[in-house]
Amino acid sequence: TCYDTFLRDSVHSNHFRPTAVLQMGTLPTSKVLRAWLGSPDAVSFLLTSRPFNTDPLHRIAMPLYGDAHELAEHLQHQSVESEWAKTWAVLDRDTRSSIDARMEAMDTLFEGKVSWILSRHLPVGTPVFLASSMSVRYAEYFWSAGNRAHSIFCNRGANGIDGTLSSALGLAHRGKPAVLLTGDLAFLHDSNGLLAARQLKGSLTVVIVNNHGGGIFEHLPVAQMDPAFEQYFATPQDVDLAKLCQAHTISHQAVTDWDSLIEAVSVLPQAGLRVLEIQTNRKVDKSALSYFTQLP
């Protein structure tokens, strides 16, 4: 849903303030959602199949061990506030319509639009691996709801960047043609995974958003600490990805407009590894994100 956008408005976040929260599995990445769920007035329950802490918010919570089916069998019937859900659904629908209209009208290369396009144009049932940092976050913000049945995978945790390409190759091996959405640093961090391309029995399309550094840090206060920010946090790189792919005899395509991206992902190869590179500007991407998260 579009909670990351409309929960930024205090009117909406206060109106939908929960009195109880049932968390199943791990939380999404959105800081806006996490802050809203962290309300001290809400009673929290954590449903997990294994006895470990799945709550990064460190709330006082009641652990429930099992799965959703087991929980449903033992729950007593509860009265519900139907208007709450209806109002949320209407707001989510209207927010989605506004986002879609702005995406349709955007011609410039914005990192967030890549996720939006993939969600609409990848073949039905495509397995999608999301890299850490902004790749997974933009997918959370802009991946369109629908019936295309894309299976989503990612590595999470303090070292979620490790093994990004190799994990995606494992997903594609002996499976359906798969797609990896990644930034340049996550890709380069595991570029030795390219050595395994010859062993791949399947198809992997790597969509690299190359903004020449760590775009996620542009959204943090440390971005104001120039010149130290660029060297120590953004860590800019100028690797020629086309030549890197050529060295490994891997197909590389520079994508310079949205129509080319749509054409490249609407039908996926049946075998082999290929790279689609989209170059963006991280500082422009930050401003563009604000354009979508601050809707009137």
Image (tube, rainbow, N blue to C red):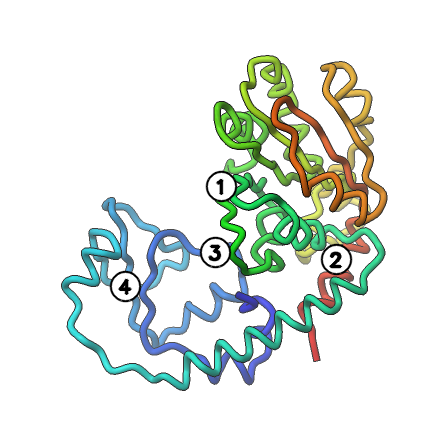
Q: Along the polypeptide, which appears first: circle 4 or circle 3?
A: 3
Q: Residue at x 81, y 55 (%)?
A: 284
Q: Residue at x 81, y 61 (%)?
A: 106
Asked if residue 244 lies left or right of residue 204, the reply is right
Q: CA distance from mark 2 to mark 4?
A: 35 Å
- Mark 4–mark 1 CB contact (< 8 Å): no
Q: Would you name the residue on which mark 2 appears?
A: 286
Residue 250 x %, y %: 72, 20
Q: Residue at x 53, y 61 (%)?
A: 31
Q: Would you name the residue on which mark 4 appears?
A: 45
Q: Nearer the viewer, mark 4 or mark 1?
A: 1
Amino acid type for the residue under numbered disc 1: Phe
Residue 41 x %, y %: 35, 77
Q: CA distance from mark 1 to mark 3?
A: 13 Å
Amino acid type for the residue under numbered disc 2: Lys
Asked if residue 27 lies left or right of residue 241, the reply is left
Q: Would you name the residue on which mark 1 appears?
A: 153
Q: CA distance from mark 3 to mark 2?
A: 20 Å
- Circle 3 crowding by C-alpha within 10 Å: few under 14, some 14–19, many from 20: few
Q: CA distance from mark 1 to mark 2?
A: 25 Å
Q: 22 or 161: nearer the eye?
A: 22
The image quadrant of residue 195 is top right
Q: Is residue 113 above or below residue 188?
A: below
